[in-house]
Image (cartoon, rainbow, N blue to C red):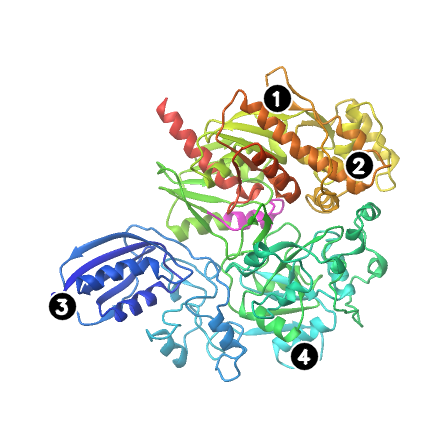
Amino acid sequence: MTKAARQYILTGRVQGVGFRPFVYNKAVELGLAGSVYNGSGKVFIHAEGPGTALDRFAKELVDAAPPLARPQLASCTEVEPRGLDAFTIETSDSGGEAEIHVPPDLFTCDDCLAELTDPGERRHGYAFINCTQCGPRYTIITAMPYDRPNTSMADFPLCADCAAEYGNPADRRFHAQPLACAVCGPKLDFVSDEESNDGSPLKNAVAALESGRIVAIKGVGGYHLVCDARNEEAVALLRKRKRRPDKPLAVMFPLRGEDGLDAVRECIELDDVIAAALLDPARPIVLAPMKCDQLPASSRTPDRVRGDAGGKYTSSSRNLPGGKYPGSPSRSDSLSRHLAPGLRELGVFLPYSPLHHELLNRFGGPVVATSGNISGEPVITVNEEAQQRLGPIADAFLHHDRPIVRPADDPVVRPMAGRWRTIRPGRGLAPIERQLPARLASPLLATGGHMKNTVALAWDDRVVISPHIGDLDSPRSTDVFKQVINDLQNLYDVNYESIACDLHPGYASTRWAQAQGLPVLQLQHHAAHASALAGEHPGVERWLVFTWDGVGYGDDGTLWGGEALAGNPGAWQRVSSFRPFRLVGGDRAGREPWRSAAGLLWDQGLNYFASEQIGSEALELARVAWQRNINTFTSSAAGRLFDAAAALVLGREAASFEGQGPMELEQAAQRGCPALELPLAADENGLLRADWAPLLPVLTDEGREPAERAGVFHETMAQTLVDQALEIRQRTPFDAVGLSGGVFQNRLLTERAVDLLRSKGIDVRLHEQIPANDGGLCFGQVIEAQAGKKKASRI
């Protein structure tokens, strides 16, 4: 039979996902000879054999690829046969033009889980088991191509047994770069002041959790602070030590039952969307509703939320000692009421590493697994730093000696409008790679915002968005911000030549961009939000995007945040907003919702009455400053309206974390309430403004239940959005309405707006992979910068 020969070049996600072993086995199955190797992010294949077999080979390279691969057949070329009689995997070639795709960290596959729990297997109970279809990637890679010497596993030489698996094409560990076993791989280390440690690190960690202690555990992308999620005193003590009085804590549940979700079902109301999110390979934290019998008392009855407005603990948790763990844990079958005070939703996720699986299987129940960091900073990754910085919080440490090259916090998603949507990109979901609508003239770095920072590197027709970095308020956050920028350049072999950043002069990301000595393009905050959404839905030509958030520096020097922008990337026009109002206290307004409430009332000639928490003297000073326009700023932010409503309805006058008031307001809201009609009128510049004033009588009416007032507020905001869209459509045609900005993390508001818009025959688009909050700004900056330059070049 006549032999033919072809060269195939594949791009996309083809490294770190077992693609070369798949190619080898597929070639052997089809009776083909030749070779495969990695080269600068691509996979190069030479194959020879019958033409029909080569045709089938080309098709199955894409159609039958490993489930975590995303291959694209870039070319298939006829070449001269070499007379080969076998198929081989060759050494990677790091030369040539780079087209690199860095794989994210992968969850533990079913085959490895079965082996992990089988006493007859040599890796039984080994906390670092993996194969070509699972295990760490992004957090261990030091350089590309993705080969063991270019990972933090380089210092763990393979033992004879592992080397045999690594070199056997028939083995599922063939060329698995993180391959290890208990003989040659990473090891655990338990550190504690207790004298009862028996030498088994995992057993000691479980015993510590069972006794009510807090353990800092090193995972894939950083440390978690872990305690028993059913132990009231342990959870309250974690909050006290971490100085995190109210912000929800994530809970990791063990796999149980046929689909692995039975343990979650005991506490969480599951539907198909939530189940799919929990079981996604990224294993994200999913914001999901708790069952009624699991709700804390303050969440069951909305009017009780106001009594907890100060963010203080209830019952015995107020007076726990700060330096010791409880001696006799109070443990029950129910989750602690301290996990998500004032909320009906809980962040839940499944174990994704073999260490987590072993820990939860031995512990036998759910655990709090919150980021091991100082609030707002990136997660800690280094053993010594964890001991030093987390020492005041943790009673014990479960370390391992596999270095984490770069941090990757857990991703967070929320089911909304029929699918789950990214709130925080992280381990497993990021780096996010997307294709641009056109090629860039030169590489571009986008530095994002100040809060929930992510960065993006764009070149040619590609853009890569980093995992969540955090709030840029501390030296460590800034250091990680710089590290991630350098890592992206090194991993993808791309050096940026210009920078896009936010218009706000006070953002750390903006100040850093301006100090680099490169061309800088400053872009308006809400234009970047709108362009981020447009970048996810490139098929829409004419947009109307509502960009609602808390803070965004406007073109006129005021703080925007309740805007609607019409047009498309590079050519946005501000067409509607809210009536502006003045706030006092600068940046403090974001953490003190009473300032928003007072500003609205004072604007209407009404009084805001002091609580014990604020004090009459502080309130009077603020009122005088507001009257004299001292340390005040003008805002049109929808986020500040939500803050004001939370203060007036729930008594949430101070927030211990960003968005606390609006989150509680959403959870408290009664469904099906009627909407108020907010007047719409054009201002002196022709900008359509919605007047919030008619909301105040309802929000301040203590004769109505808080749930009703919160419900009326949400329904009114959704209806106002629709009213603005209908009014704008009369003079500015659009093809779709988009919802972007942090306010649209609110599920009730978003779903009501979507339903109302669709009832009017309007196409609605939401964020999917890119966060609606400031974590999506960097992507929007890339889209906006590219479109702006393209339009400028045509003038």
Look at label 2 and name its amino acid: Leu
- Farthest residue in the top direction? 684
Find the magenta span and give its range: 465-482
- Distance (Cα) linking label 2 and label 4: 52 Å
Look at label 3 and name its amino acid: Gly
Identify whether 349 is placed above or below 683. Answer: below
Look at label 4 and name its amino acid: Asn
Residue 80 seen from this side: yes
Identify whether 356 is placed above or below 562. Answer: below
Viewer-side label of 3, 4: 3
- Distance (Cα) linking label 4 and label 1: 68 Å
- Distance (Cα) linking label 3 and label 1: 74 Å
Identify whether 570 is placed above or below 670. Answer: above
Label 1 crowd (10 A; few <14 / some 14-19 / many >=20): many
Q: Which residue is mark 3?
A: 83
In the rendered image, the quadrant that contains the C terminus is top left
State the image quarter where residue 518 is shown: top left
Q: Which residue is mark 2?
A: 648
Viewer-side label of 4, 1: 1
- What is the secondary structure assignment of the residue under circle 2? helix
- What is the secondary structure assignment of the residue under circle 4? loop
Q: Position of residue 208 (x, y in %)?
A: 70, 73
Asked whether the residues under the numbered discs 2 and 4 touch, taking CB atoms below 8 Å apart as contact, a structural biologist would say: no
Q: Position of residue 10 (x, y in %)?
A: 30, 55
State the image quarter where residue 255 is shown: bottom right
Q: Which residue is mark 1?
A: 688
Label located before the other in sequence (3 or 2): 3
- The residue nearer to you, when weighing 145 against 256, is 256
Q: Which residue is mark 4?
A: 197
